[in-house]
Image: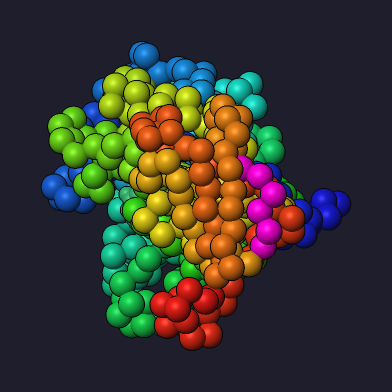
Amino acid sequence: MAAQRTSYSERMKWFHKARFGMFIHWGLYALHGRGEWVMFNERIPADEYARLAGQFCPEKFDADAWAAIARDAGMKYMVLTTRHHDGFCLFDSQVSDFTSVKTAARRDFVAEYVRACRKAGLKVGFYYSLLDWRFPGYFNPRKYPDSAAALVRQYHEQVRELMTHYGKIDVLWYDGGWINHDALETAGFASKADFWQSKKVNAMARRLQPHLLINNRSGIDEDLDTPEQHVTASKPGRGWESCMTIGDSGGWGYVHSNPNWKTVPQLLQNLVTAAAGEGNYLLNVGPRPDGTLREEERTRLAALGQWLRMNGEAIYGSQRCPLHGGMIGRWTRKGNTGYLHVFRWPGREAVVPLVATKARSAELLATGAKLTVRQEHNGRLVIGGMTTRPPHPYANVIKVRFADEPKAIQERDTSKWLTGKA
Ligand code: FHN
């Protein structure tokens, strides 16, 4: 008897609280150290690329270490590439020999990853690439219809395996659902979802995993929008998650010389911007071939975790807040409490225009240090009693308790402020 499917809002509850997750791109491609697209970018023939599986023996792989880094960073879930576009599976599969169980490693890394997530109290996400470059039918479904059909069959069967053999799964993170439009048309498919038969496979996944969240990359919107390398909020009520690399966008998988790493303030501002839009931040790591994480990733994640231990109240389960942050930063909210995330510390006072709601009190969230509040007739809220220099170098949160849910004054005549009126 299929378990009763739960409502969207019910399924989304933990996700809205979580706000922050770890994306992990790891597989054979790490051996080359030139990103996860190396097979395609360098047009490495399938047989030559497959020989990498004989070298993939990540002796230092430790899923518990990954989970501990994620947990200490303040992350609440992980999403691992169970299979990327190269078709190599980090899990056991009855429909493929190109797996980490049937080749040199002889390990089901997905099983180890799932156990580690649960032990660390993290929700479990599976990334799965629909496309598999090894099938010519992906590139030309009209010329190779049997290969295209085999590709789709493999994807359906492997999604069933992933939804069946590893206990309760929380997120199914599809990727690689794009197909050349002309190729689709000439092969007689009306859409990507038609080619992948996504409706059928997603219905099966939900029967097996009634609480599952599915992203929007199988050709159907499903539960989550997935802005990539940027933080753009979906409309209220629609779940979304910004996925991003810590290094530059040149590679999600391991790149052995990546000169361009985002700073902790940049990463923090992305996390806050996601939380301000009631969305999540899925921050990526690309482990080395041996399974270890780079110093540049570990130090940044540790710094984010330290900040979240002091300010997580303003992030986890955050709601949208209409108040203006201006040059100073961004607002999140929980009920009648607003959190002003100060990216650029203004000095001894912070001015917030167009506040319609009475502010009762203000304090520095991290320390509880009391601040003052003064509201002027034109809606300007002046928070005072601040130190000249920022208490924390990256971002500081001012917690403001309001008499009601904080609202902004809607300006009908924007020039009114010139005369001191709202
Ligand atoms: O091609 C993939 C890429 O390798 C990476 O997995 C990202 C992560 O969202 N998704 C695709 C590019 O949009």
Residue at the right extreme, as displayed? 1
Q: Residue at x 47, y 18 (%)?
A: 65
Any magenta on residue 361? yes
Above or below residue 84? Residue 74 is above
Q: Main secondary structure of the magenta part?
A: strand
Q: Which residues are magenta?
A: 357-362
Measuring from the top left, give residue 260's x and y in whole percent: 19, 39
Q: Residue furthest top?
A: 59
The residue located at (15%, 35%) in the rendering is 259
Pick the residue in front: 337 or 251: 337
**Scheme of colours in the image:** rainbow
Q: Is residue 410 visible?
A: yes
Q: Residue at x 64, y 27 (%)?
A: 121
Q: Say which of 403 and 139 sits in front.
A: 403
Q: Residue 251: image x %, image y %?
A: 25, 44
Q: Toward the viewer: 262 or 114?
A: 262
